[in-house]
Amino acid sequence: MRVVICGAGQVGYGIAERLASERNDVSVIDTSPTLVQAIRDNLDARGFVGHGAHPDVLAEAGAEQADMIIAVTLHDEVNMVACQVAHSLFNIPTKLARIRAQSYLQSHWQDLFSTDNMPIDVIISPEIEVGEMVLRRIALPGAMDAVRFADNSIAMIAIECREDCPVVNTPLGQLTDLFPDLNATVVGILRGNGLFIPSSADQMVAGDVAYAVVERAQVKRTLGLFGHVEPEATRIVIVGGGNIGLYVAGEMERRNLRAKLRVIEANRDRAVTIADQLKRTIVLHGSGLDQNLLREADIEESDLIVSLTNDDKVNVLASVMGKRLGCHGNLALLNDADFQGLTRPLEIDAFINPKSVTISRVLQHVRRGRIRAVHSIQNGLAEAIEAEALETSPIVGVPLRELDLPENLRIGSIYRNGTYVKPTGSTKIRAKDRVVIFAKSGAVRRVEQMFRVSLEFF
């Protein structure tokens, strides 16, 4: 696939890194010579210094032969114009744009991004994507990571195996025998800095993070078996009233969730603005690092502190401080990989990486075959993928034990006619099944091949 990426920041670089490692033909455009040089030095991709919406720059980057343009610069308007130029002058088939300003995304302007107006096929709003991820984490206390598949009927959760975890040091095959009615499959284990696909003989040990694909109705039971019986958070303090913090609080009000919310915002004008928009949330003006203000927000009686500012240091310190002042749990927004590595020593229960969330959303539309959803794991070490099987898919009609599947991927579940199917060696995938797969980075291309449309289909 030939892809032109406009923007070489964290997200653009991350997308280029992933696609280039899979031997796609990637060109990256940015106005910063430093960022472009980093692309040239570190990736198997071409870098071009220039404006991503200028026709001559797009032409130099190979837009005439491109299959897709991904516009993720810092400016919405540049992203929008880049897609328009890509459509009007170069007839690029697929156009993705990152749009941050919520004004463009209001429902009564929904016709703006259409073929007749501004031809953008996929709109990516980082604030909404991250906000939804925060809401899912709040809904699943005890999970370090959580993503839903198959119309929200299946979840993949990451669970920390603590010293008191009841299922450590037990072969996974034995766990299946002990809980035959549990619709859950451990598909990956993170141990230290390494991630591997376990076999039935492997065991989890204290300190591991287990990735399990679970029927949604049995998520809480699965967490309980791992020793995570955390109650639902009903008293929440949000540090940071920016776009993400406001979205989370607003959605919790709109969905009539019964949590009592308090938002701490450092900017006075912003605090006044969001206080006017929120109906049942108390908004406090001040620093999330002010212990007196945290106590005023009743941090000692709270179930969860969620740090969502645009400063990683504030998010880390506020999370640690809140927990030490008596808050039961914490969740932090972290961009910097160095800070992400400190979460467990600092007793930060879970974190969200905005870059990873955005990249996952982009990859969902880049992956070939009938790929419905993608979630990036541990900065690209693996991916959880939902794919739809077609009649011509090579994996259809063959028992799983007879498929020549690589060792670095595992089928976690099958969704068939609205029903969860736990995969076994004798299971046969049928056409129209939706399959959730956990694949290390080196096996992603194989997943695409497994769900490809054969030439005979045409």
Image: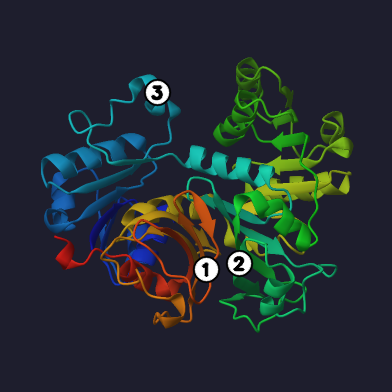
* Helix, strand or loop status at disc 3: helix
Give the percent coordinates (x, y) of residue 74.
39, 42
Q: Nearer the viewer, mark 1 or mark 3?
A: 1
Mark 1 vs 3, N-terminal side: 3
Tell me which amino acid carries mark 1. Answer: Pro
Q: Is residue 120 left or right of residue 209?
A: left
Dot 3 corresponds to which residue? Answer: 107
Mark 2 vs mark 3, CA separation in Å:
39 Å
Q: Is residue 75 left or right of residue 311?
A: left
Tell me which amino acid carries mark 2. Answer: Thr
Dot 1 corresponds to which residue? Answer: 423
Mark 2 vs 1, N-terminal side: 2
Count neighbours of disc 1 (C-alpha within 10 A) and say few if under 14, some if 14 to 19, many if 20 or more.
many
Q: Nearer the viewer, mark 2 or mark 3?
A: 2
Q: Are marks 2 and 1 in contact (CB under 8 Å)?
A: yes
Quarter occupied by residue 299? top right
Identify the mark at residue 185; answer none if there is no mark. 2
Give the percent coordinates (x, y) of residue 240.
66, 35
Mark 2 vs mark 1, CA separation in Å:
9 Å
Give the percent coordinates (x, y) of residue 348.
74, 55
Judge by depth and name the residue closer to the eye, 50 or 142.
142
